[in-house]
């Protein structure tokens, strides 16, 4: 299979035709070999327009949703970015193609090891992959200019909101259990106050541990 041709087709047919106009995002999607973030037996589906399960609740995020997250965040060359959930490193790798530095956190040690190895092999030395609880973010390197969630969430943890810099942007797909389709939401932090704006629709799976809390009524 010609993966470079498949990547070009993905960009032309999935990305450019769906409101992705940021040239930095288009270039990142065009350059980063998505297949390398999958086990070899899944290379053939690397450029499908869907989320690809990786096991343990992790998945390679759908190309268009990855592009929408990046475009909505409006990442700049001097930004420091936190990605909550790194899976095998695809979204952090895309962000690192634009930003100054990226911190990618996951609590699955197998994922962090794979992501670190793949990104190192690609020479992406501006990404720091760390292991820790997703809901706590990574306060050690805060504040962040941009925070991205690499999967759907029901609620943004207060600990992560606190790590967003003033004038920072946070983008997440917000979902509740009743709806398969979530909303891509842009949060802006201004003078310590968080505002939100709904931007796009996405049927993204939940990040592990970010599902809605079950409630019981009697």
Image (cartoon, rainbow, N blue to C red):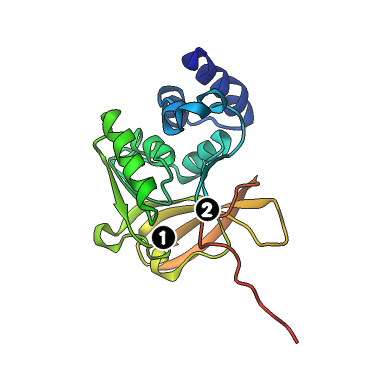
Measuring 41% from the left and 47% from the top, which residue is drawn there?
A: 86
**Mark 2: few/some/many CA within 10 Å (<14, 14-19, 20+):** many
Q: Nearer the viewer, residue 70 or 116?
A: 116
Residue named by callout 1: 134
Residue named by callout 2: 172
Drawn side of residue 80 relative to residue 17, left or right? left
Per the image, label 2 sits on a secondary structure element best described as strand
| Residue 191 in view | no
Image position, residue 215 (x, y; %): 66, 77
Drawn side of residue 179 relative to residue 37, left or right? right
Looking at the rendering, which quadrant does residue 163 occupy?
bottom left
Q: Earlier in the sequence, mark 2 or mark 1?
A: 1
Image position, residue 109 (x, y; %): 35, 52
Dots 2 and 1: beta carbons under 8 Å? no
Drawn side of residue 204 relative to residue 35, left or right? right
Measuring 39% from the left and 53% from the top, which residue is drawn there?
A: 108
Image position, residue 106 (x, y; %): 38, 53
Q: Nearer the viewer, residue 28 or 22?
A: 28
Q: Residue furthest right?
A: 218
Image position, residue 13 (x, y; %): 62, 22
Query: Does 141 appear above or below 218?
Result: above
Disc 2/disc 1 C-alpha distance (Å):
14 Å
Query: Which circle marks residue 21 in the picture?
Result: none
| Residue 152 in view | yes
Looking at the rendering, which quadrant does residue 125 occupy?
top left
Q: Residue furthest bottom?
A: 218
Measuring 52% from the left and 53% from the top, which residue is drawn there?
A: 172
**Mark 1: few/some/many CA within 10 Å (<14, 14-19, 20+):** many
Measuring 58% from the left and 39% from the top, which residue is drawn there?
A: 51
Per the image, label 1 sits on a secondary structure element best described as helix
Q: Report how many numbered discs are placed on residues in the image.
A: 2
């Amino acid at each position: 299979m010609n993966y470079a041709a498949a990547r070009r087709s993905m960009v032309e047919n999935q990305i450019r035709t769906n409101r992705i106009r940021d040239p930095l995002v288009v270039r990142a999607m065009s350059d980063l070999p998505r297949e390398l973030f999958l086990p070899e037996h899944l290379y053939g589906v690397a450029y499908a327009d869907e989320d690809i399960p990786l096991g343990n609740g992790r998945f390679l995020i759908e190309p268009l949703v990855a592009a929408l997250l990046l475009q909505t965040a409006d990442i700049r060359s001097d930004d420091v970015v936190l990605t909550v959930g790194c899976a095998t490193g695809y979204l952090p790798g895309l962000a690192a193609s634009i930003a100054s530095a990226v911190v990618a956190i996951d609590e699955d040690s197998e994922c962090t090891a794979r992501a670190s190895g793949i990104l190192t092999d690609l020479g992406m030395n501006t990404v720091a992959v760390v292991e820790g609880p997703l809901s706590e973010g990574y306060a050690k390197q805060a504040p962040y200019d941009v925070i991205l969630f690499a999967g759907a969430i029901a609620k943004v943890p207060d600990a992560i909101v606190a790590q967003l810099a003033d004038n920072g942007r946070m983008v997440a797909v917000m979902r509740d259990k009743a709806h398969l389709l979530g909303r891509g939401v842009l949060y802006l932090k201004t003078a310590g106050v968080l505002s939100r704006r709904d931007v796009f629709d996405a049927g993204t799976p939940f990040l592990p541990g970010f599902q809605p809390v079950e409630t019981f009524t009697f």
